[in-house]
């Protein structure tokens, strides 16, 4: 008899010191969502975002490439840009040092008096960037393996499930602050043991819970299920694409997920950790060219009012419970046949979290 695998100690979800270590390590050395490429369509377009506590910005160069830089001047550290915008060159608001869109220092007032200055040696600090079906991801680790190593086959599978991905643009972002640790929210997203009791709309209206399964695929957790009676869907799912009668999702550890609803409707989850006890979840909804779509808007509202609302109460209650003196980590329900009533994805997430804190993230060894 082996002892049951237990959930992580509560301090992993409550201790600010653990959160500090996560920011210094795992969250800075994994692929994190930055923006959608359609948000910066033209040369000089930029948008700012935050990763692991650092401000960064993505900017499109004259060569069409998207580059990402830490949002800090190489003179005396003023921030360079804020929000979104378009610019010909990046000008620091403090003393007007000017950088090319490629990050090289171009000029600065009176720099000629600085003896021995090698201007070519000054460049904005860049971060690794990958475009993944129109989504821009960043990794602060210069030696990070490419996303296809972390998430094997996901690019090809999503390309099949969302064949028109290159025409899609964001239509709606729904922002959901949750008073819980980011891992509580992600673990809740990654198991459906709680679904039939807590998500009546999702369980009865979209998926067939008895066929629901979640399996690791590198550092991706792939959700698959058969759908309920598709005649009962509240919208027309006949997109003309393969998989229009399916539902699937690809969670890219640690903080992003692609979901495809019947009718090949793409939507995304994007988590940003605020501190040990707070996370913000953005639900992204897309349409062709970002054009108005009653169907997508209605899905976004229905999702916000049902599954999302139901989950907020669950995760916030768990976070309060994790601070209770009466909590001892309980056993995970690991069914050898996996399936909807098994918590094996939690085991993977918790192993990945511990390994990452140990500095052991390696896409070649996810099992
Ligand atoms: S800090 Fe940017 S120009 Fe001085
Ligand atoms: Fe849920």
Image (cartoon, rainbow, N blue to C red):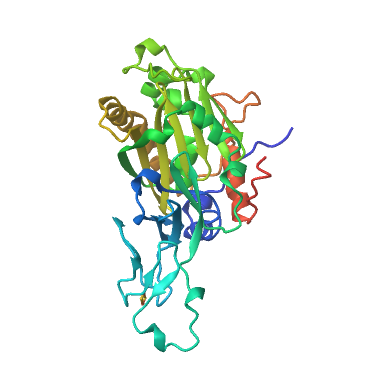
The residue positioned 40% from the left and 65% from the top of the image is 100
Give the camera-side residue of 248 and 316.
248
Residue 324 in view (yes/no) = no
Q: Quadrant of the C terminus?
A: top right
Q: Extreme right residue here?
A: 1
Give the camera-side residue of 27 and 325.
27
Q: Quadrant of the N terminus?
A: top right
Give the camera-side residue of 74 and 192.
74
Residue 68 in view (yes/no) = yes
Quarter holding residue 233: top left
* Residue 118 screen position, x and y as percent: 50, 80
- The relative height of residue 43 versus residue 310 in the rendered view (above or below) is below
* Residue 298 screen position, x and y as percent: 27, 27
Q: Extreme front residue here?
A: 63
Compared across the picture, whether 32 is left or right of 97 comes to right
- The relative height of residue 343 versus residue 81 in the rendered view (above or below) is above
* Residue 82 screen position, x and y as percent: 31, 61
The residue positioned 36% from the left and 54% from the top of the image is 43
* Residue 144 screen position, x and y as percent: 59, 53
**How many badges with numbers are in the image?**
0
The residue positioned 65% from the left and 49% from the top of the image is 362
- The relative height of residue 202 versus residue 113 in the rendered view (above or below) is above
Where ligand 1 lies, by quadrant?
A: bottom left
The residue positioned 40% from the left and 77% from the top of the image is 76
Compared across the picture, whether 104 is left or right of 341 comes to left
């Amino acid at each position: 008899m082996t002892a049951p695998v237990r959930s992580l100690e509560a301090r992993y979800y409550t201790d600010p010191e653990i959160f500090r270590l996560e920011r210094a390590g795992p969250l800075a050395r994994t692929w994190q969502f930055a923006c959608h490429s359609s948000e910066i369509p033209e040369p000089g377009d930029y948008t700012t975002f935050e990763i692991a506590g650092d401000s960064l910005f993505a900017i499109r160069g004259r060569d069409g490439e998207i580059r990402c830089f830490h949002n800090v001047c190489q003179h005396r550290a003023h921030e360079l840009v804020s929000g979104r915008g378009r610019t010909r060159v990046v000008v620091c608001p403090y003393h007007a040092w000017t950088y090319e869109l490629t990050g090289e220092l171009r000029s600065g007032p009176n720099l000629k008096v600085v003896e021995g200055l090698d201007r070519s040696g000054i460049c904005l600090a860049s971060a690794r960037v990958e475009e993944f079906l129109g989504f821009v991801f960043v990794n602060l680790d210069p030696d990070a393996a490419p996303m296809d190593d972390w998430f094997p086959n996901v690019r090809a599978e999503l390309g099949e499930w969302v064949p028109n991905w290159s025409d899609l643009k964001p239509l709606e972002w729904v922002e959901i602050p949750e008073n819980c640790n980011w891992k509580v929210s992600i673990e809740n997203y990654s198991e459906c043991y709680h679904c039939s009791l807590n998500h009546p709309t999702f369980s009865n209206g979209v998926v067939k819970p008895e066929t629901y399964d979640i399996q690791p695929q590198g550092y991706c957790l792939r959700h698959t299920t058969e759908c309920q009676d598709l005649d009962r869907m509240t919208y027309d799912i006949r997109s003309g694409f393969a998989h229009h009668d399916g539902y699937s999702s690809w969670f890219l550890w640690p903080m992003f997920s692609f979901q495809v609803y019947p009718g090949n409707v793409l939507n995304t989850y994007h988590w940003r950790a605020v501190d040990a006890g707070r996370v913000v979840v953005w639900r992204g909804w897309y349409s062709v060219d970002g054009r108005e779509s009653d169907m997508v808007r209605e899905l976004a509202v229905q999702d916000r009012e049902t599954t999302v609302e139901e989950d907020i109460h669950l995760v916030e209650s768990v976070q309060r419970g994790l601070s209770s003196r009466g909590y001892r980590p309980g056993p995970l329900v690991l069914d050898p046949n996996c399936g909807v009533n098994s918590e094996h994805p939690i085991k993977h997430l918790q192993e990945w979290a511990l390994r990452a804190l140990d500095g052991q993230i390696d896409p070649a060894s996810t099992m």
